[in-house]
Image (tube, grey):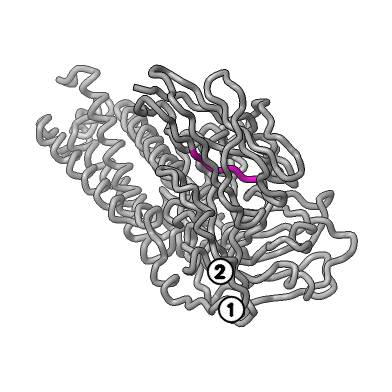
Amino acid sequence: MNPYPRARRRLRGALVGIAATLVMFGLADPIARAFSPSAAPLLTLGQAIIPLAPPAAIKPVIALFGDNDKVVLVLSTGLGALVLGGLIGILALSHRRLATLFLLIAGLVPAVVIVLRPEANASDIVPTLIGLTLGIAVFVVLLRLGGSGEPGSDRRGAEHGSRTPEPLSRRRFFTLAGAFGAIGAVTIAAGQTVASLAQDAGAAVAQLVLPRPAKKAEPIPAKASTDVTGTAPFLTDPQDFYRIDTVLAPPVVDPEQWSLRIHGMVAEEVTLTMDELLDLPLEEHHITLTCVSNPVGGDLVGNATWLGYPVRELLKRARPSADADMVLSHSFDGFTASTPITALTDDRDSLLAVGMNGQALPPEHGFPARLVVPGLYGFVSATKWVTELEVTRFDEKTSYWTDRGWDAKAPILVASRIEVPKPLGKVSAGSLQVGGTAWAQRSGIDRVEVRLDDGEWTEADLAEEVTIDTWRQWRTDFAEVEPGSHTLTVRATDKDGTVQTAKRRDAIPNSATGHHHIQFRVE
């Protein structure tokens, strides 16, 4: 009879499975650094989950975690693996061989996912196989030393003349299992997954020297700012620029190996290398980008000065068919976006961009090249790590997000937000200064109005407009606001006369709508 109570035996079994899982993933992770990001099993498993996520789950995750959604996904994947490992360890108490088989099958799943990745090499499964071998070895050793195998196994071993090690004391067992688990955790922290989530591919970026623009962006006038402390700056620092995409870690793309292929319904296929792109007369433009998942008043919007070459000029080389109405852009990681061909061939400043705010694109924002298209939400236009432009038709091809129920064309809607005061903030009694931003690309902001509590709409003062494709700051002041709780509401009107709707709706299929309002307290 086992001297330990059932709960204690289950705890031992769970610890065996958890320690083995940590070793399995942990030791594979640093080895993967010698291969590629797609060789890290934990990272690859997390990446494989993204396309499987139902559309209804995507919006709340982005709204809740924002730019941290990928870190949360990796942590959730790791936690799920540990729970599974713990359950397999408990199963081993009564069915050791079956549990070992389950652990083997579970460990082979990331190997299969890695092999199926389009950018992976066959050798990329080596780290996973090494980790799996060591993980199973730890699993077997801890089961034997823990004395928590199948009932009667010690007696059967004695009958057949085999020697079974004496079970370790509880303290020694926990120390050994903890040591294996710690080794796995430490190696994960030092491995490819953490490095990929934190990496900035700085070496490759530093080697790319951008030319001076042949056409510089318009100077940003001092009056483009309202000087309200706490309002977002006119240009967003790349570190603060929102990031929403379908990869857990930015792919490391060698600019010397990068090329753009234009094909499909064209008279002539065009291939462009990075050297050829940098030799073209590049242009600078201030352009605001917005994510369709941005909640009302949210921060999934940013403004930058982009350097690139007009996409319309590249498409002219290929001579698209008159029947084509869409360009399907392909990313290095397999993502696709469907952009109306008119948005890439009309007079707007749609760019194949290589620079952001005077520097090469950061990896998380598309290095070495990406699309920037004013007037459309990013999921149909702002493809990062772009490698192909396929000229086609909407009735013949679909893209990553349109397959998941989102709008195919996605024009940006007029929107505004309050940035000062902060939601639930406290301000001093007396006059109240209010500030924020508004945007209505391809038209421009004509008017912003603010309402305090249930009062009348008050027209705000607008900062100077830089271009119709950038956001515009605004401010207004209220005199003698009484102490207590208050509400502020904002709405914008574009130059076409479209008033921002008060009707609330979800982001799917084309942007959340409604007036942004906040509550604050005067003391």
**Percent coordinates x, y for residue 403 in the rendering:** 70, 43
Q: Residue at x 78, y 58 (%)?
A: 341
What's the magenta region?
A: 435-439
Q: Nearer the viewer, residue 242 or 391?
A: 242
**What SS does tag 1 mark?**
helix
Q: Residue at x 55, y 37 (%)?
A: 417
Indicate which disc residue 354 carries.
2
The quadrant of the rendering that contains the N terminus is top left
Marks 2 & 1, CB-CB < 8 Å contact: yes
User: Which residue in the structure is indicated by mark 1?
Assistant: 278
10 Å crowding of disc 2: few (<14), some (14-19), many (20+) = many
Inspect the image, locate mark 2, and give the three-letter code of the amino acid beneath it: Val
Q: Residue at x 49, y 27 (%)?
A: 518
Inspect the image, locate mark 1, and give the three-letter code of the amino acid beneath it: Leu
**What SS does tag 2 mark?**
strand
Quadrant housing residue 217: bottom right
53 left or right of 156 in image: right
Indicate which disc residue 381 carries.
none
